[in-house]
Every structure is written in structure tokens, then in C-alpha cells.
Image: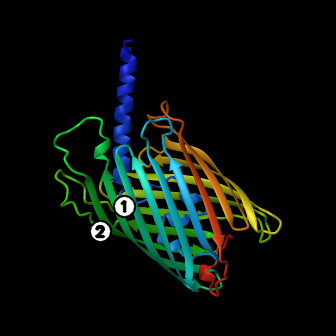
Amino acid sequence: MISSPNRIVNKGKLLIAVLLLSFTKNVAQELNVPVATQYLADNPFVLSPTYAGIGDNFRIRANGFAQWVGIKDSPRNQALYADFRIADQSGVGASFYNDKNGFTRQTGAKLSFAHHIILDYYSKQYLSFGISFNINNFRIDTENFNIVDPSITNDRFTSNNNFDVGLLYRRKAFFFSVNASNILNKDTKKFYMAEPNLLRNYQIFTGYTYKSDRDSRVEIEPSAYFQYFQSDGRSSTDLNAKIRYYDNQRTGYFWLGATYRFLNDQPLKPLTLGPMIGIKKQGFYVGYSYQLTLNELANYNSGTHMITIGLDFLQKASNCPCTQKEVD
């Protein structure tokens, strides 16, 4: 059966959109864990090393997400995060990830250190400094190519190292963090064709937690996440809102949320929009997020699905308020 011209055009548009969006994603994520909504699942350590060690527990989070479900070879990512306090005012953390997008595959790790200080004890103002060492391996699965190209005779693999640095300011229930990722230029000597060596990008994450009184079981947390890529000037913003409801003993909570992502030069044309849900009880955490695609791929996929599972254990209170969470 011969396909209609409109069907052929639609398939062509889909292919072009997938290729362009996949290319954009690869450039953006290289030497980084791709940012979906992991940081909202009780895990801001995803965004910045400055959060390492804030809290009274050894914290582990396992995260997996599937992007553009319904499109063959669409991006998939799995990651594991852990951070804990090593002294009253310091913390360390690590993350490991595996990312697959079509024929490209990335694996990597980050090792992080953070130090926290008191700016003013009575007004509960704290400042945190963080640094991460990044290891990233990038590979093209040439053995899975459907078309045999005689010019491809070996494995396409490269490895790079880099650093992230960040600052975090907190005043009671307000927080503001700024982070610079991939501060060193990428080594491109291994590449035959032109390859961008500037991967530096900047992120800002800020928000505030509202509660009617000290004993309130309900908390509302609006937040915003901004990301800017220095190489080509691209930038995007997430606008988020979460509401938590604690149990009577405050040993856990149930939460609901929503996120809205857009390119900053097109604020009225959202990229994704979706709900979030989660529960934490006696050290166990589970969360789910769904993002509805609102760009050119909306007619070809069922959106992005993400799940987070976590454990908090080895609880030990800090003697310094700078590593104690204002919101538990």
C-alpha cells in the first residue's frame, strides 16, 4: 500500500524533530545528568553539590525516567544519588548515571564536597559552598547501525573530566542556589569533525516554604529553576509548586506538585507540563512525575514518566544549625 503524501510529510517532520531534539539534548546533557524533575523528588542534590550533607540522615535516591514514550529509541536514563554529613559543617556525595539516546550512550559519575557556615545565628542565615568532580564516558553504538558505513571501522568512544561549583544561601524557609557546571572547556582533540568545546552552563534554583504556623501539618513550596547554556545562549525555566501534608507524628508526609517548563524566549509556549506525587514514611521515599510533551512531538508520544525511590537512614542530628533542614 502506497502512503499518502500527507502521511509521508508527517513522518518526515517527526524524523526531523526527533533528530533535532535528540541533538539538542546530547549537547545539553554532556558531562551532566539530564535534568527532568528529579530535583523536586526530595533531592536538590541533583542540581548542586552545595546540598550535600544538609539533613540528619544518610540519603540515597534511585531515579529512572523514560522520555517521549512511544517513540522508538527515545531517551532513557537511570541514576543513583547519595549524600551524607561527615562533620558538623561538611558533607560529601556521589552520583552515578547511565543515559541512552538512540545510538548514543553516556555513563558517568560525580563526586561532591560541600561546606556550610553560619552567617547569622539568630536570623537563621546560612551559606554553603560546593564542588563536584565529574567523570563522563560518551559512546556511539556503531555495531547497531542499520546501514553499514565502510568509513566507520572502530568504536566511537571518548572520556572527559570536568568540575561544577556552587553557592547556596538560606534564610529560614527561603533558599537560593547558583551553580556553574562544566567550568573547564572540553578536550576535542579526539574528534575529526568540528565539536563544541564549551559546555559551561549555569543554573539557579530558588524557592520558599510557606506554613501558617510552627505546628502546621501543611506546607506549600513554590520554586523556580533556571538554566542557561553559554555556548549558544539557550535558556529555560521551570515553574514549580508543591504541597506537603505531614502525619500526626511528623515522621512522614504525602505531597502533590506540578511543574511548567518553557524556553525563556517563548514563555507562552510551554515545552512540558505535568503533575507530581510522592510519599515519605519512616525513612522510605517514593515519588512519581509525569510530563506532558507540548512541542512538535506531542502527537507521537505519551509524555515523559519518572519514578524515584529513596532511603534515609543512620540518623544523627548535627550540632550546627547550618546542616539542619528548616523543612524536614
Task: Tell me which residue sits at (59%, 52%) in the image.
Answer: 307
Quarter the N terminus occupies: top left
Q: Position of residue 250 (x, y in %)?
A: 78, 68
Q: Position of residue 244 (x, y in %)?
A: 71, 59
Residue type marked 2: Leu
Q: Which numbered disc, 2 or 1, marks the residue that appears first in the sequence?
A: 1
With 145 as the anchor, is 211 left or right in this view?
A: right
Q: Nearer the viewer, residue 51 or 74?
A: 74
With 11 as the anchor, is 275 left or right in this view?
A: right
Q: Position of residue 101 (x, y in %)?
A: 39, 46
- Number of labels in the image equals 2
Labels 2 and 1 touching (C-beta < 8 A): no
282 lies above or below 99: below
With 267 as the anchor, is 22 left or right in this view?
A: left
Residue that label 2 marks: 184
Q: Nearer the viewer, residue 3 or 1?
A: 1
194 lies above or below 318: above
Residue that label 1 marks: 31
For label 2, count other residues whose C-alpha is less than 10 Å away and answer few (under 14), some (14-19) or many (20+): some
Task: Tell me which residue sits at (58%, 58%) in the image.
Answer: 40
Residue 37 visible within the image = no
Q: Position of residue 225 (x, y in %)?
A: 51, 58
Residue type marked 1: Leu
With 299 as the anchor, is 209 left or right in this view?
A: right
Task: Tell me which residue sits at (79%, 66%) in the image.
Answer: 216
For label 1, count other residues whose C-alpha is less than 10 Å away and answer few (under 14), some (14-19) or many (20+): many
Distance from disc 2 to disc 1, alpha carbons, whole Å, reads: 11 Å
- Check the image and tell me how it is coloured: rainbow
